[in-house]
Image: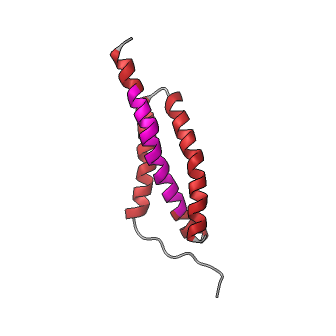
């Protein structure tokens, strides 16, 4: 076997496990933040929904890491998922949700 095959497989495993976890955490954080800001859910409910969604996201990313034929596409998607959370954290602050209570 060629050394490039082993290096590619090792990078794919690292990207799937480590990058998939980092992307899942970022997407769960972003979805919880969006659930609070856009829908007006309570914080604890939004975090619970986002954490449950995170299990499905991580499984999907981990499986996709081994099915995707191009390693650069895998890394690009993982970086875009992480960048989405960074854009929400350091972007312009959103206004408070409008609720009908009052």
**Residue 74 versus residue 32 in the image, above or below:** above
Highlighted magenta segment, given as a residue range? 10-32
Residue 17: percent from left, percent from top? 45, 38
Dividing the picture into quadrants, the one containing residue 79 is top left
Query: Is the stretch drawn in magenta largely helix, strand or loop?
Result: helix
**Residue 90 versus residue 68 in the image, above or below:** below
- Quarter of the N terminus within the rendering: top left
Instruction: Decide which of 2, 88 is in the foreground and name it.
Output: 2
Residue 73: percent from left, percent from top? 44, 34
**Residue 57 versus residue 87 in the image, above or below:** above
Dividing the picture into quadrants, the one containing residue 44 is bottom right
- Quarter of the C terminus within the rendering: bottom right
Residue 71: percent from left, percent from top? 42, 30
How many labels sit on residues? 0
In the displayed orientation, state which residue is furthest to the left. 3
Residue 63: percent from left, percent from top? 55, 34
Q: Is residue 3 left or right of residue 95?
A: left
Q: Is residue 73 left or right of residue 56?
A: left
Q: Residue at x 56, y 50 (%)?
A: 54
Q: Residue at x 59, y 52 (%)?
A: 53
Q: Is residue 20 magenta?
A: yes
């Amino acid at each position: 076997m060629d050394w490039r095959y082993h290096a590619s497989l090792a990078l794919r495993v690292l990207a799937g496990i480590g990058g998939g976890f980092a992307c899942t955490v970022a997407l769960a954080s972003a979805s919880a933040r969006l659930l609070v800001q856009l829908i007006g859910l309570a914080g604890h409910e939004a975090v619970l929904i986002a954490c449950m969604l995170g299990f499905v996201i991580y499984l999907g990313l981990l499986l996709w890491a081994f099915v995707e034929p191009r390693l650069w596409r895998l890394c690009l998607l993982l970086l875009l998922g992480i960048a989405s959370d960074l854009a929400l954290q350091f972007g312009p602050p959103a206004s408070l949700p409008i609720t009908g209570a009052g």
